[in-house]
Image: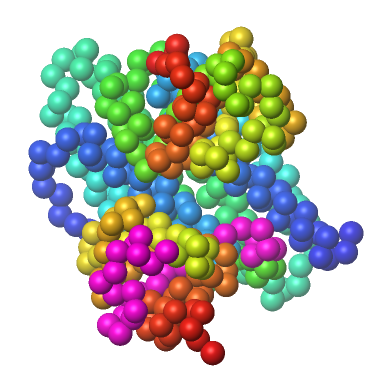
Amino acid sequence: MPHFEKIEYKPIPVRELLLEMKNLSELMIDLAYSAALFNDKELAEDVIELESRVDTLAYLLDMEIMVAARDPKDAQALIGVSTVAAATDKISDAAADIAAIVTRNIGVHPIVGAIFEKVEERLMQAIVKQDSAIAGKQIGELDLAASMGVDIIAIRRNKEWIINPEDTERVFRGDVLITRGAPIGIKDFKDLADGKHAKPEESP
Amino acid sequence: MTEQEKFEEIVARFVELKDTSELMMDLAYSSLLLNSRELAEEVQRLEEYVDQLHTDFELLALTSDFKKEEASGFLGLIRLGVATEKIADAAAEMAEVVLRGIEPHPVLKLTIKEAEETVTQACVTDNSPLANKTLKEARVHEETGMWVLVIKRGGKCLRPKADSRIQTGDILIASGYAEGVEDLKKLASPEELCPIE
């Protein structure tokens, strides 16, 4: 049985909750398709984890709206917010459905991934290991776009997600990086994060 | 059709389904940001198109004579289609808020503006390098990172094609990462402020 986080009312601005729901639901779609098309279990598990985060946010947001609505005028002004929040929740559910194709070992026919590999960039997860050359560096210093055609689109650090991190953000040992790029580039980057070689151009 | 061609056809339908659902999300957020009925109606039209596409895709997948050991892979494909259709539904539900005459709450507009992936509008002034260029020549995505979703011209919404010519007075509705918004506005209206802001 999945673990359900206990819900307690916390005063958090509606804007913050909705923003996180929107950002996460869109990240989840990208992660989920990439997981399904390339049969990537790690990405699929990230999506499942994010899904429960979005569910929690949906509870918190509903409570904020209930507290905020004091009269019919408020209710009419806020109904749009709750409808849009519910739609982002539905999108994150759909992403989790896609991820479940992978985690339940159903799999999408491999020829689909083969066709996609030619046209689409894919996402991949890389974990920063202790002896990796990138540990402690700022994203901007790594110059990934130029050297490998890779972009870091999200970082998972402990339980927190940083989406679309700034160039000044540092990556640390143990960080889970979600990268986007051409298939070869992101495999090279995964090796780099793993500490398998210092830099791709220096490897024999 | 050879087996390979059949697969390519199924994948092509799926790509269309996926691209359309993602366009619908962008347009739905745009309709909320701008409180635009036209954009919301476009989302509803696309929702009908997606339903048709989804049915075609499922029929094509189910009628390809796959081998027994491929059944699981085809089930995965079908489920991928169902989830994609669900995303399109969610987009249509967002756009419905506008069509029901609910004035989008300022919090909604703020959220859409502040999100990592956002939508925006820019109007093309006559000193813009975009004026009188086709979308292909204008290279908007290369220059700004933003994708043009819709061209609004005289109250009509036009779906952009590579050979669509951008005219002075057009309003471009575009999506992309927030960094690109200012670049797009500068490109479309170089000196003056956009009269629609």
Is the residue A96 above or below the residue A17 in the image?
Answer: below
Residue B55 drawn at (x, y percent): 69, 43
Q: Which of the two residues, A92 or A3, is positioned nearer the viewer here? A: A92
Residue B68 placement: quadrant: bottom right
Q: Which of the two residues, A126 or A202, is positioned nearer the viewer here? A: A202
Residue that appears at 22% across and 12% down: A73
Residue B90 appears in the rendering: no
Residue A43 placement: quadrant: bottom left
Is the residue B56 above or below the residue A147 in the image?
Answer: above
Residue that appears at 83% across and 60% down: B5
- Whether residue B197 appears in magenta in the rendering, the answer is no
Is the residue A181 above or below the residue B19 in the image?
Answer: below
Residue that appears at 46% across and 34% down: B183
Residue B168 drawn at (x, y percent): 61, 15
Highlighted range, magenta? A115-143
Residue A34 drawn at (x, y percent): 52, 61
Residue B137 drawn at (x, y percent): 69, 35
Position of the N terminus of chain A, as image quadrant, is: bottom left
Q: Is residue B180 left or right of residue B52?
A: left
Residue B47 placement: quadrant: top right
Is the residue B41 above or below the residue B18 in the image?
Answer: above
